[in-house]
Image (tube, rainbow, N blue to C red):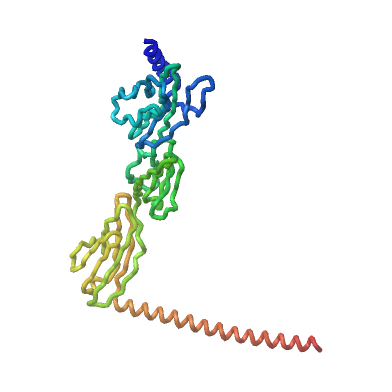
Amino acid sequence: MEVCGCWKRLLLLSLRLLFVVPAGLPVRSQGDSQSDNKVMDNITVRQGETVYLSCSQGDVVTHTAWLNRSSILYAGEDKWSVDPRVSLVTLNRDEFTIKIENVDMSDEGLFVCAVQTSSKPRTTSVHIIVQVPPKIVNFSKDLIVNEGSNVSLMCLATGKPEPAISWRMLSPSGDGPGSDEEYLEIPSISRQRAGEYECTAVNDIATDTKTVQLVVNYPPTVLEGRDVGVTLGQRGVLQCEADAVPEADFEWYRDDRRIFNGFDGIEIENSGALSKLTFFNVSEADYGNYTCIAINKLGSANTSIVLYGELYIFLYSFYKSSVKMRYYTEKKMMHKNYVKKSFATFCICFFLRKFHFR
């Protein structure tokens, strides 16, 4: 009866010890010089792994048990815990070992092995520290904004140790804004900042990453149109190219009259940022000024293109030839003047030299 009473007191003392020491407070490896009670080194284990808890026994042990923060796990060979992850590994006169599989954060804390001998009770305690890989749990979704807007991208992560957060721009250039904070702030965003951004959460265990696509809308800008010369009866193509997000819709006009696909044998072909106005058999009536307008929900832009014929081609060629001839003529005259000036300079220098040495 006395042994049974001592055993009950030992279990009660062990439970009191568990409640006195806070569950989240690691303990140092130390020994008790006045008793056989021991505090083992902290055990650090990663979430999902298996941890083994072991304590020494002895020939004179009458009762032994493993306890966690609030309950008895094993009393000898009898399992008191209802947790299927906890099981007995070894129980003999040398050691008492149990294991906990698939360790989680809820397992972190103090564990005590209580031993009752014929002379006195003793305990062995150990603190389990559970490390958790980072996991991004709250993250911005793909975002579409207008140019000039203020943008805030969010990346929140859990883990132990607490993960470090970093942002960087992946595409198109990789030279965009970055941050070492949970929030990436981009004030008055420009179209050059559109692209894919990556958030990385890192701790001593692992790395977690997520990406978000940032689209920046802006009104069209149209490249300056190039005039096109086509002889009668030939095929002529006018091209109009626009940069815009979302992609622009194109409209073609001759003077104030809008041109539609198939009108008077004219074909309009739109492909992404490029629009083509094609004449399959150019006539005198087709020559003139055409206007291309690019439109999206944020605005519009336009350019003018001239379709001209043989007379214009001849005059333009004559003009280019005249300019070229004038260039070479002026260049030749400049060369003659340079030779004259050089000869005159030589004569003066020669005369002065002779005069000086006399």
Q: Nearer the viewer, residue 92 or 324?
A: 92
Residue 354: image quadrant is bottom right
In the visual, does 160 lie left or right of 247?
right
In the visual, does 94 lie left or right of 245?
right
Q: Position of residue 187 (x, y in %)?
A: 43, 44
Do we see residue 179 in this rendering? yes
Does residue 47 sit above or below 331 in this rendering?
above
Q: Nearer the viewer, residue 135 or 288?
A: 135
Q: Residue at x 38, y 34 (%)?
A: 51
The residue positioned farthest toward the top in the image shown:
1
Q: Nearer the viewer, residue 195 or 198?
A: 198
Q: Position of residue 352 (x, y in %)?
A: 75, 86
Q: Position of residue 57 (x, y in %)?
A: 41, 25
Q: Residue at x 69, y 88 (%)?
A: 347
Residue 112: image quadrant is top left
Q: Residue at x 36, y 50 (%)?
A: 196
Does residue 19 sit above or below 248 in this rendering?
above
Quarter placement of the N terminus? top left
Do we see residue 156 in this rendering? no
Q: Position of residue 107 (x, y in %)?
A: 37, 29
Quarter placement of the C terminus? bottom right
Q: Nearer the viewer, residue 114 or 262?
A: 114
Does residue 290 sit above or below 38 in this rendering?
below
